Image: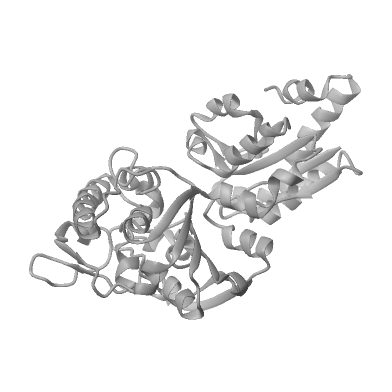
């Protein structure tokens, strides 16, 4: 039997590579001679640099930048010298994992450090970028990034605004005269795991703000501030981008890239799948195992498991997805090519223990599924139907 193992990371529990290894251990506990092809995935968030540097033969570069609160932090990005290509995860500078829960302040958090990463890559000679949007603790519409690259964000009196999304309520002008011309002329492939617009009930503030510590009042304030920002950005950049799919990604960083850069927005998982040759590796596979920390209705918005399932469907391979949490709306995924959605928790557990035990729980869940698949094989059930029956899909 051939299994293709293409999970994303399980946030704060295990990387995509660690998840693929846990799946393989579970499979081999039941099918010791199975062929297991590990293809760690990402969707523009955590793991994107690792996946693409591995696929392209690049190098990892480390540089000191500011985190979302303005503190110095060592951040890494990928660079492929022969292609003059930089691979950046914005979370390396503005990531939620860099700021303890008690310290998070989404009103003032800034993407300035992302602009510093881009500047370092430009200094190194980059003319092409792959930028993974995901995992941010910011909601400033990319204003901090623009500032780091030479733009000035001014109030009605011509004074520079403070950093952070809330300050944008006082924005009147974005002066792009000093914007780094190298940044303007470079080409950007924006890898995003979401298709949300900048504003509205599906926008950056309403959907992602609460995940970053915003209470209901902060969500309202940030929505109002980004509305001002969107209007000014449209006038001063010449591009109206607020309603474009992906503009709300990473707290609105998508909007800044769409408005001020030569950029193309793509589903992050497609970028990684191409580089990792997933389609080729699906040839002859019996099953695909994928997954990530949480699977729910949001998975339809460009998340890794959906992209993997779409690729597997083109090859007629059943897909089983594992998750730490199978949440509301997940049942719609059965209409998108998934054979089964499998929660990995074995018992009631608090979050710290669930995160620590993630690899062991994933291994155990994979072994359990394989025992059911083995039962289906022994009963002589046809390959395609076997997976659905054995997992209760």
Q: Determine the residue positioned at 88% across, 19% down.
A: 379
Quick one: quadrant of the C terminus? top right
Q: Quadrant of residue 284?
A: top right
The answer to whether residue 212 is left or right of residue 375 is left
**Residue 80 in view in this figure:** yes
**Quarter occupied by the N terminus:** top right
Residue sticking out furthest to the left: 157
Residue 355 placement, left or right of 67: right
Percent x, y for residue 349?
60, 43
- Residue 286: image quadrant is top right
Residue nearest the observer in this picture, 80 or 160: 80
Q: Position of residue 48 (x, y in %)?
A: 57, 58
Residue 73 in sight here: no
Q: How is the image coloured?
A: one colour
Residue at the spot 21% in from the left edge and 61% down from the top edge? 167
Placement of 88 over or under 250, stated as above or below: below
Q: Residue furthest front?
A: 185
x%, y% of residue 300?
50, 35
Q: Who's the residue at 69% across and 56% down the image? A: 17
Q: Number of labelled discs?
A: 0
Asked whether, in this view, residue 365 is left or right of residue 139, the answer is right
Taking 335 as reference, is 26 left or right? right
46 over 126 or under it: above or below: above
Task: Report the front residue among 73 and 116.
Answer: 116
* Horizontal and vertical percent position of residue 53: 63, 65
Q: Nearer the viewer, residue 63 or 23?
A: 63
């Amino acid at each position: 039997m051939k299994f293709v193992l293409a999970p994303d990371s399980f946030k704060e529990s295990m990387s995509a590579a660690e998840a693929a290894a846990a799946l393989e251990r579970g499979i081999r506990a039941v099918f010791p001679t199975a062929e297991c092809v590990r293809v760690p995935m990402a969707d523009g968030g955590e793991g994107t640099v690792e996946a693409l540097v591995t696929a392209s033969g690049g190098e990892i570069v480390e540089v000191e930048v500011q985190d979302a609160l303005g503190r110095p932090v060592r951040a890494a990005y990928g660079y492929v010298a022969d292609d003059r290509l930089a691979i950046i995860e914005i979370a390396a500078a503005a990531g939620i994992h860099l700021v303890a829960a008690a310290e998070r302040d989404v009103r003032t958090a800034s993407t300035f450090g992302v602009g510093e990463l881009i500047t370092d890559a430009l200094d190194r000679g980059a003319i092409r970028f792959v930028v993974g949007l995901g995992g941010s603790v910011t909601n400033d519409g990319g204003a901090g990034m623009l500032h780091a690259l030479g733009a000035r964000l001014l109030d009605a009196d011509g004074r520079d605004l403070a950093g952070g999304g809330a300050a944008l309520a006082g924005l009147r002008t974005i002066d792009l005269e000093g914007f780094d011309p190298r940044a303007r002329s470079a080409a950007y492939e924006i890898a995003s795991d979401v298709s949300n617009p900048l504003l509205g009930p599906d926008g950056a503030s309403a959907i992602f703000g609460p995940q970053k510590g915003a209470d209901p009042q902060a969500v309202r304030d940030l929505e109002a501030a980004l509305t001002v920002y969107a209007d000014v950005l449209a006038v001063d950049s010449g591009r109206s981008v607020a309603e474009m799919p992906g503009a709300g990604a990473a707290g609105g960083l998508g909007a800044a890239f769409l408005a001020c850069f030569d950029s193309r927005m793509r589903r992050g998982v497609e970028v990684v799948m191409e580089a990792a040759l997933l389609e080729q590796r699906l040839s002859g596979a019996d099953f695909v195992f994928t997954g990530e920390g949480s699977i729910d209705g949001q998975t339809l918005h460009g998340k890794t498991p959906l992209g993997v399932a779409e690729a597997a469907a083109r090859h007629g391979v059943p897909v089983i997805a594992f998750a730490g949490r199978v949440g509301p709306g997940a049942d719609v995924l059965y209409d998108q090519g998934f054979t089964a959605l499998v929660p990995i928790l074995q018992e009631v557990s608090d979050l710290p223990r669930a995160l620590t035990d993630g690899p062991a729980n994933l291994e155990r869940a994979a072994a359990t599924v394989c025992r059911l698949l083995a039962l289906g094989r022994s009963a002589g059930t046809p390959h395609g139907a076997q997976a659905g029956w054995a997992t209760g899909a």
